[in-house]
Amino acid sequence: MLCPMKPSTRRQFLHTAAGSVAGASLIGSSRAADAAQPTAKAASRVLGANDRIRLGFIGCGMQFQDLLRRGFFPRRDRVGDIDFVEVCDVWQPRVDNAKAKTGAERAGRDYRSLLARPDIDGVVIVVPDHLHYPIARAALLAGKDVYLEKPMTYTIDEAAKLHDHVQQTGRMLQVGGSGLNSPLHQKLHAYVKSGKMGKVVWGFISYNRNTTEGMWDYPIPGIGSEPWPDAPVTAENLDWQAWIGGARKRPFSKERYFRWRKFWDYSGGNATDLLFHRLGALSAIVGFDFPTRVVGAGGIYVQKNRQVPDTYMTTVEYPGEYCFNMVSCMANESSAPITVYGNWGTLQVLPAVRPAPGQAPRGSLGGRAVIKAERTFEKQFKEANDGLTEVEITTDEPQQDLIDNWLESMRSRQAPIYDVRKGWQVTVAIQLGVQSYKEGRALGYDSRARRILTELPTRREYEPQES
């Protein structure tokens, strides 16, 4: 249970805490880290329009490589306003690889020394889920802006605390996910809010995959699906205790290190790795909110070498009187489109249309969506949609990468698009689903009291009127 934080000013927060960021340990749990209460430092400088943004990277695995390819290298080549200052990872071969790829000035295995540097403006945190909060917290208190990969935190409690740290330090924190930066989803949000498809009653998302070797059974050693057969993996070149962090203490294990997404100690499986993306996208269309009731279900039906399910689904209910259904299967890759159901019409997000020869494609850059009228409410739909029974919404507006959005927020000091509050709201739904699956019962959330509910209120009923 989370206790509401007493009101305090940012100045009080910065000056009443004791200790130092350098004393915060990676291996402590979030509770232990909070108990240490290190002093929050002011940022080392205010970025000017022509200042280069100096970056540090904590975690140099598969997702780090993807962020470089997708966002940071293109930004460096296109705009040229960022410097790779330091890279950090607990496994030395990844440190060496990251330094060679980025040309970083320095490389190391202790993130605390990276955060202690006054010449680093922002840090990119790409580590297993259980380490997100303690490292992000330490970075904020060190005066750094933060790009934090999804899921935002390993627990709901951590998400609420991280929200408070962002508010009280004034730092910019971007959650790495998908959907919020889509111009199409922004247009769809305006359409849904206009009421032209009636009252939204439910939404559906899925994110499915299939592999011969089993999901997340990556080569050992390696980075993701890329094998590194010649890379040594020993207790000397991999800081096991730092990687374990606040999780349950266990002996050195290559299986756990390279395939951590299969274990509850470090991950929420399908929900945190995949459905976090889709829920962010669906929420961008319908609207963000805290859930009221969540039920998780599924099981390990095919890939019986893991703790997390290979087939998982969740129903999430919201105070606006609608629900979302989420499905993620690791044993069948057929996925369904994002779908929003209103009582007048149904919206589906679809691939771009292949053009006829000589014609420009529709939605080739930003995608498209189609909203079709419900037969029963065709009259109301047509009246709201200029006489149409089917509406197509497209955009060819290019999508700004979350990395660019974060870097720009560092200059403007305006909150990035996937801010910490949205991350908290998505985290509650995702992590409640995981906890519900593990405990075999429905769970709720009281966002005012910041606590998980095990005893849920009865559902509202309406007494029919006499006819």
Image: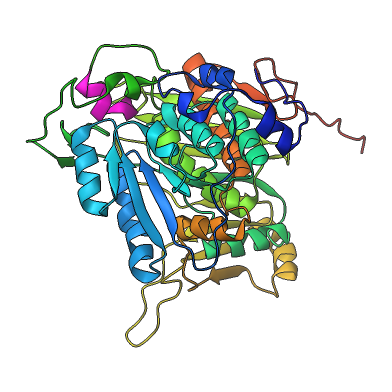
Q: Residue extending furthest bottom?
A: 358
> Left or right: where does residue 372 sit relative to residue 77?
right
Please state which of residues 148 and 387 is positioned toward the viewer in this rendering: 148
* Residue 336: % across, % down: 43, 49
Residue occupying image coordinates x 20% and y 42%: 96
Report which quarter residue 288 is drawn in: top right
Query: In the image shown, does 203 or 387 lie closer to the viewer?
Result: 203
Q: In this view, does 201 lie to the left or right of 94?
A: right
Relative to 123, is 255 above or below?
A: above
Q: Residue at x 30, y 39 (%)?
A: 332
Query: Which quarter shows the N terminus?
Result: top right
Q: Characterize the magenta stretch by its predominant secondary structure.
A: helix
Measured as percent of width and height from the top left, residue 205 is found at 49, 45
**Which of the two residues, 150 or 13, is positioned nearer the viewer here?**
13
Q: Which residue is drawn at 59% across and 52% down?
A: 284
Which residue lies at the image location 53% right of the left edge and 32% below the top edge? 137
Using the rendered view, name the quadrant where residue 380 is placed: bottom right
User: Does the magenta run of residues contain 408?
Assistant: no
Query: In which quadrant of the rendered view does residue 158 lie?
Result: top right
* Residue 187 position (above or below residue 12): below
Q: Is residue 272 above or below residue 123?
A: above
Q: Give the range drawn in magenta.
A: 253-262
Using the rendered image of the protein, determine whether residue 283 is visible from the camera's viewpoint: yes
On the rendered structure, is 450 left or right of 229?
A: right
Image spot of residue 403 (x, y percent): 45, 56
Name the one closer to the observer, 159 or 383: 159
